[in-house]
Image (cartoon, helix red, strand yellow):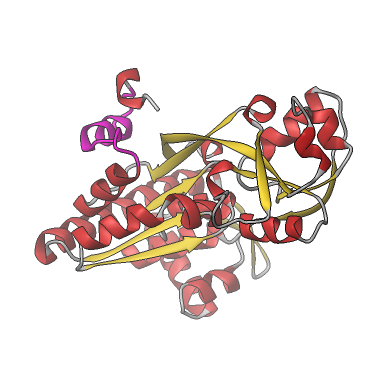
Amino acid sequence: MKLQQLRYIVEVERRGLNVSEAAEALYTSQPGISKQIRLLEDELGVSIFERGGKRLTAITEPGRAILEMARRILRDAENIRRVGEEHAGGDSGSLVIATTHTQARYALPAVVKKFVDRHPQVRLSLHQGNPAQIAEWALQGEADIAIATEALDQYPQLVMLPCYQWVHCVIAPDGHPILDEKSLSLAALARWPLITYDPAFAGRSRINKAFELAQVEPNVVLTAIDADVIKTYVSLGLGLGIIARMAYDPQRDSGLQALSAEHLFGSNTTRIGLRRGTHVRRCAYDFIELFAPQLTRRAVDMALAGSRPDEEYQL
């Protein structure tokens, strides 16, 4: 039995039993993967996959157990490699942060600056995507840390660490009639075209839920993943914008004004996600604490061990 064989069966499962896609992802050949899977099955004396002709059609019952153990072995092997690199190389190597545009643009710059100053030998990479992509990158080991507001809590394989809370605001061009509203309401917003986030991003689920509960139909004419894009089209007069409050700066965003919308949409929690069973390196602990000071190494370790005392998670 070889680690490479375990990588092959795990990747084939991940690719929906498509051996060609697995071969492409692993930079090898389809016949090579098929041969190694057969050799592993012969060694174990069981079939991992059911077949229809030359195609894999399903995972057998023993195959499911083998795949679960293979994933655990590969995680442990990766953790061994990380421990070796950390102790042999000291404060070096790479750290990959998977996050959304909003976090990368508005929440992370000061943290990244401090981290780079403190760890000049660590190569820091920011991978931007939607929350589902971010979670998958963390689960597959392609990212060390996942940071997002939406979706991460839907992945039980990730340990969730709440970081901070934020709220939405409504932005409008100078002189817009909505600015004269004494108390902003959902009904008032629904009278105007709205520009806001794509449904997968930046607390959009809370916006949708608020309108649904009020039985008010919003006129969303444009969506984007980028608050700067939303502000651009608001400036052009195409509608009112609903964005994260952190994305509005009265000096930078001249010509636009912001109205508080916390009373309409509530607050949102940004979370860090770590893959269960992963080895967290010293630089990763440091990045997490820079981003969320309440998440000390002790708090992170307790969360990874399955203990979450309330005093460690005050936002």
Residue drawn where x is 20% and y is 67% of the image = 120
- 102 in magenta: no
**Magenta span of residues:** 292-308
User: Whole-percent x and y of residue 66?
Assistant: 43, 48
Q: Residue 61 is drawn in which quadrant? A: top right
Does residue 162 sit above or below 89 in this rendering? above
Please state which of residues 210 and 28 is positioned toward the viewer in this rendering.
210
Residue drawn where x is 31% and y is 24% of the image = 307
Residue drawn where x is 67% and y is 61% of the image = 229
Q: As drawn, is 139 to the left or to the right of 221? A: left
Q: Quadrant of the N terminus?
A: bottom left
Q: As drawn, is 86 to the left or to the right of 222? A: left
Task: Please say whether residue 131 is visible from this viewpoint.
Answer: yes
Which residue of the protein is positioned furthest toward the top in this rendering? 310
Please state which of residues 280 and 173 is positioned toward the viewer in this rendering.
173
Does residue 25 sit above or below 80 in this rendering? below
User: Whole-percent x and y of residue 172?
Assistant: 73, 47
User: Whole-percent x and y of residue 221?
Assistant: 84, 52
User: Whole-percent x and y of residue 97?
Assistant: 40, 57
- 297 in magenta: yes
Task: Please say whether residue 280 is visible from this viewpoint.
Answer: no
Please state which of residues 68 and 52 is positioned toward the viewer in this rendering.
68
Q: As drawn, is 29 to the left or to the right of 224? A: left
Q: Quadrant of the C terminus?
A: top left
